[in-house]
Amino acid sequence: MSISSLFGGRYDNKFLLNMSSAPKIELIVDKVASLSEGRLEGRLPEDWFRHIMDPETEFNSEFADALCIGIDEFAQPLPFLPFKALLVTGTAGAGKTNSIQTLAANLDCIVTATTSIAAQNLSVVLNRSKSAQVKTIFKTFGFNSSHVSMSERQSYIANDERSIQIQQKQDLSIYWNVISDIADRALGAVACKTKELPDLCESSVIVIDEAGVILRHILHTVVFFYWFYNALYKTPLYEDGIVPCIVCVGSPTQSNALVTSFNPLTQNKDVKRGIDVLSALICDDVLSKYCEVDNNWIIFVNNKRCADHAFGDFLKHIEFGLPLKPELIEYVDQFVKPASYIRNPMNEIETTRLFLSHNEVKNYFRSLHEQVEVTNRNNLFVFPVYFLIKNKTFEDYKSEIGNFSLEIEPWFKSNIHRLNTYSQFADQDLSKTVQLEEIVLEDGSVEETLITCHLKHIRNSSIGVTSKIKASTVGFSGTYEKFVELLQSDLFIEKTSCDQTIHAYSFLSGLMFGGMYSFCCSKFTTPEVLMEIKNIKMPSIEFLESEMSRMSPDVQTVETDERYDFGLVDDGLSDVDLLEIDPCGDPFFTRYSKLPLTNSLSFEEISLLYTTFKDIFISRFAILQKHTKGKFGKTLLVTYNRNNVSRKQCGEIYSHLKSFYGMLTYAIPANNYTLEGYTNDNVVHLGTDKQLPQILYKKGLPRLVIKDEMGFISVLDNNVSKFIDVVNGQSFHLCTTVDYATVSKVSMTITKSQGLSIQKVAIDFGSDPKNLKLSSIYVGMSRVTDPNNLIMNVNPLRLNYENDNFIAPHIVKALKNENTMLIF
């Protein structure tokens, strides 16, 4: 008997499972609140944070590369920084995110995630506004792009003492290159009073989602920066001695934490497995005992992402390390389809492909693009990506690493994964061939080398942005029904910050102004419809008429895109005469022939304009809905702000005024977008980057045009990022990348998908995987929300795989511990 059958089918299984676990989830709030009441037993040393000795020198007096925080001669040993920890683990989709939602709703806490994609997901789940997006834990404690190349180091311990105090210093020593740089910058910023209060000063409760993919030393790094920032800014939290409570959420049986190192001399990268935060808290006796994990562990048991009983039972066997019985292995056989079927991009078009490696993702994209190029070449976009190499800095870099024979092109190919977001270049179909050319200045000197590659995207494909990118929202594309719903609900206005409200009203007024004419041109429009449209009351707007009288149609202003003149040739004709002569003649534009500039009107005038246009637009919509019995509302409306816009076959979107005028917004990683096309026209508010050489604009630097889930069309600004390598403590600004900060969501690696719920999943484990791990099988299969929408090229459980679930015995032991909180 199913769960829902007990309730007469009124509720689905997912709803019932979530509701049944709700009371215990609420107990997590009490648990965290209790842990967050901890206080220091005594005061930390006065000004301990201003001058700190490198922890490694306490273990190894001969350590030559010591980095002190502050002034070396005043540096003192780092005191022990206490903390509390709560462990929240469970099967994939079991409701761990629900616990974060509950904590965020009931406690003043800092919510973070370990990866950008997990942070994006949390931002959506928590319905965070644009100004309050969930950050990664790295960004929260001050990590930035300049720290990417700072290598972690090995810590040396001269004796076998394993106290929590020694362990904390050892973990901090591993990451000290980054820690000391962030701390020194913070000390300088607070002295200049240029730094805003860091996030870690807002609360003592710090939630870290997907904590199973970061290395153990990050836990102590977060603790260090909590105490450091609060001491530096003398916050009430510090004055009261409030001990931080770190809530670590995730699954230790999913993706592994990796240690990556890069050797500048050989230009080689080394990747190996490390110990993640969750595994350390569970398996390390010293850390586990200090954090009292036996009493501070919450385990979610049932998968609620996918309420299928058999599938949930299968996932629990992997999560808890139970023996996989023959019937479970046979159960997985039903998901298998031929590899050729999965690898053919024309099959299962709406399904997200998951692969083990970045190379397999890249190969899939190449295959997909080849198919599109054959079937519909106009749907395949090829965009240039530019890399500006600073020649003199590159020569200094060669001298520092002692590799004088290193050339720019080999260096570029070895380091491309480091120049920007890794998945953007590792996964995407970036051209293998590169073009190198020297940029010659007017005086004949050559200071930079330009490298050009090309990136491919597909029109109307799902994409995301890798960071917060400036954009200009310029139009709308969707059904009339959807647009009217947005107007009536004021959803767009509500999602706009208060200081931008006047621009939101003006923008929507511009969209209605541009779309008003479409009612008279619809295939559903009849003479009867036109007569009813003519009878709609159109009140006189005094300030609009006076504005119109000041505007001369013969005078061209700089911001011509702010005005769109629909004035009719013969103003002596009546509306009825016009309708008889020209069925497409629109009386709306005899009364409101021009739309004034936003900055020439007050908020009250813009509000009146918006309300008037809204009433007329909805009245016209109601007339056509009545005459078509609702069919009109399903038709497509495409309208741009105060502008006529067309699209070429190649996908280029251009303005008849050679310029787009819109509302300044931002595209954020938490949202999904559809790639509409690109434009080469000017975009007001975005402009050009004066720091970039003009040769880039001459060679071609298009801007992508995207559509969000509500239907609003925006033009993305280009993304300019700097790559700074650090060698022997010296920073080298080697390269500036100019690209689009976008990634396709059509395919990704299994590791990257961790934490996501995906409607339809196709997993390709490869033809003969050599390094297949049980954790990869678990993560990939558990992404799906319905097992009926899961297909795989093989049954991975019938292959040779590594059972890397060494944590399972500890989880089983915790399940038997009466102090462990179990949530089913």
Image: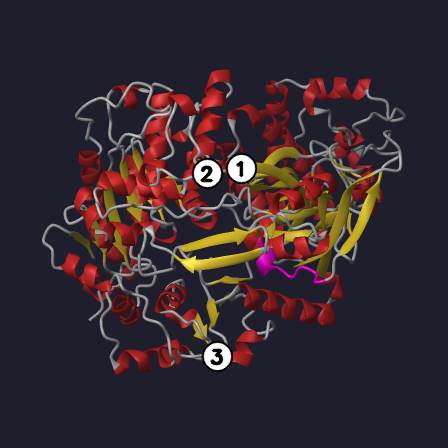
Q: Is residue 763 left or right of residue 701?
A: left
Give the number of callouts: 3
Q: CA distance from mark 3 to mark 2?
A: 45 Å
Q: Quadrant of the N terminus?
A: bottom left
**Residue sitting at the far left:** 818
Looking at the image, is mark 3 or mark 1 earlier in the sequence? 1
What residue lies at 81% left-to-right and 32% top-to-bottom? 565
Tell me the tag on residue 768.
3
Q: What type is the residue that disc 3 sits on?
A: Asp
Q: Is residue 277 above or below residue 358?
A: above
Which image quadrant is residue 461 in?
Answer: bottom right
- In the rendered image, residue 192, in percent from the top left (x then y), is placed at 51, 17
Three-letter code for the amino acid on which mark 1 is drawn: Gly
Instruction: State the image coordinates of residue 181 (x, y, percent, origin top left).
Output: 47, 33
Q: CA distance from mark 2 to mark 1?
A: 9 Å
- Disc 3 is placed on an element classified as loop
Q: Depth check: give the residue in front, 586 or 768.
A: 768
Give the vertical position of 481 relative to 204 (above or below).
Answer: below
Magenta stretch, residue numbers: 424-432
Q: CA distance from mark 3 to mark 1?
A: 43 Å
Query: Which residue was labeled with disc 1?
Result: 729
**Residue at 45% from the left image edge and 23% from the top image edge:** 187
Mark 2 — residue? 65
Q: Where, by quadrant of the figure, is residue 473 drawn?
A: top right
Q: Mark 3 or mark 2, which is nearer to you?
A: 2
Q: Position of residue 151 (x, y in %)?
A: 48, 46
Callout 3 crowding tier (Cα within 10 Å): few <14, some 14–19, many ≥20? few
Q: Are marks 2 and 1 in contact (CB under 8 Å)?
A: yes
Q: Residues within 10 Å of mark 1 (few under 14, many from 20)?
A: few
161 or 732, which lies in front?
161
For badge 2, the amino acid type reads Asp
Residue 248, position as x, y percentages in the image: 30, 46
